[in-house]
Amino acid sequence: MMLYMGRRAREAAAALALASTEAKNAALLLMAERIEAAAPKILEANAQDLEAARAKGRDTAFLDRLALTESGIAAMAGGLREIAALADPVGQVMARWTRPNGLEISRIRVPLGVVGIIYESRPNVTADAAGLCLKSGNAAILRSGSESFLSSLVIANILSEALVEAQLPDASIQLVPTVDRSAVGFMLGGLSGAIDVIVPRGGKDLVGRVQAEARLPVFAHLEGVCHVYVHGGADLDMARRIVLNAKMRRTGICGAAETLLVDRAAAPTHLAPLVKMLIEAGCEVRGDPATEAADPRVKPASEDDWPKEYLDAVIAVKMVDGLDEAIAHIARYGSQHTDAIVTEDRKAAEAFLARIDSAIVLHNASTQFADGGEFGMGAEIGIATGRFHARGPVGVEQLTIFKYVVRGQGQTRP
């Protein structure tokens, strides 16, 4: 079954690579309409998934990622429309030059081919991933987690029906019709060369397995150990807004701040108010001795807290002695995902942005902006922290590679 899906995806990818922008956009807009029209059906399936997850004792953060609402379904449809409105990357000329011998050389964007997406508890990934792959001319093989399977299956079927109506190959988007874990192993093996790249969306165990076992390129991040550094030149009111949003807006996403670093120069005026604000917002604070001294409700931090991705209302707080120590801490304990500095000192900000080797670095903004939609990409298929051409949010442009087209007039090489 998996090999058959791979062959069909490869055939669909060949057709999609030549599909017009108008055809792809028409399919995306039709998908959005069908998603909205089928909202009751999607919510019914999601309710069954949620009931089963609760019966298994899944935690609140997991249930939050799994749950769909009417507004969430509207957001899925809106994301598809935003993708349709994006420029089509396929066929874009990235560079063009002429050699002394008259050869005209162009570097042109082309689709990757077949993208395998393995995800766990977020059924909205079904629509986001399918839409991004379609716009970038790629076929998609989707493998959802068992907890989100019913929701994902309903969404995938709606998308496939829209593809047929739009006269594009229905195999452009395929959901693996089983929750058997062996399907993941087949995908990681590449399905006899059918899959070109794997994108995992899920927890550390899933991503770790994919990165360890995949026999093809992987776009992924293992953890989101994100930092907010409050520099000595930070405005307190701005720091309050950014820190609270970065940690507490949604605690279970990869862009949530997990560590707060406060400069010694700012600590006398900033540390206690920031800690107090977090605790009163319902966040557990684990801190170093300076942070413990700032508020008696702070719990002592251990060495294990600094590289910890909590994905919960918990944060580690530490006082650092200047910009160099903050950068050194992030380099040692961070995951090269997203890190932010809060300061009015432009020179310090530019040094931070230049020296922090993360996929996303921010100045005076919340780490929760680490999102393809917020970057104007319409949506994202994931966040990549590796060293491939795609780093940070993976959108339509990042789902393309390039080839060289050379035009001559009979030249031969001497």
Image (tube, rainbow, N blue to C red):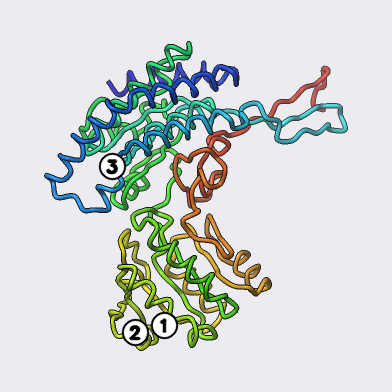
Mark 1 or mark 2: name the one nearer the start of the chain: 1
Mark 2 surroundings: few (<14), some (14-19) or many (≥20) residues within 10 A: some
Mark 3 surroundings: few (<14), some (14-19) or many (≥20) residues within 10 A: some
**Which part of the image, by quadrant, shows the N terminus?**
top left
Pointer 2: what residue? 295
Most distant residue in the left direction: 55
Element class at badge 3 = loop
Give yes or no for contact between labels 1 and 3 (Cβ–Cβ under 8 Å): no
Amino acid type of the residue tagged 3 in the rendering:
Ala
The residue lying at 18 percent from left, 34 percent from top is 48
Where is residue 223, by image quadrant? bottom left
Is residue 177 depicted above or below 212 in this figure?
above
The residue lying at 47 percent from left, 14 percent from top is 168
Q: Position of residue 354 (x, y in %)?
A: 63, 64
Mark 1 surroundings: few (<14), some (14-19) or many (≥20) residues within 10 A: some
Q: Position of residue 273 (x, y in %)?
A: 43, 79
Element class at badge 1 = helix
**Which part of the image, by quadrant, shows the C terminus?**
top right
Pointer 3: what residue? 67
Question: Gap in Å between the C-alphas at discs 1 and 2?
Answer: 7 Å
Pointer 1: what residue? 272
Element class at badge 2 = loop
Give yes or no for contact between labels 3 and 2 (Cβ–Cβ under 8 Å): no
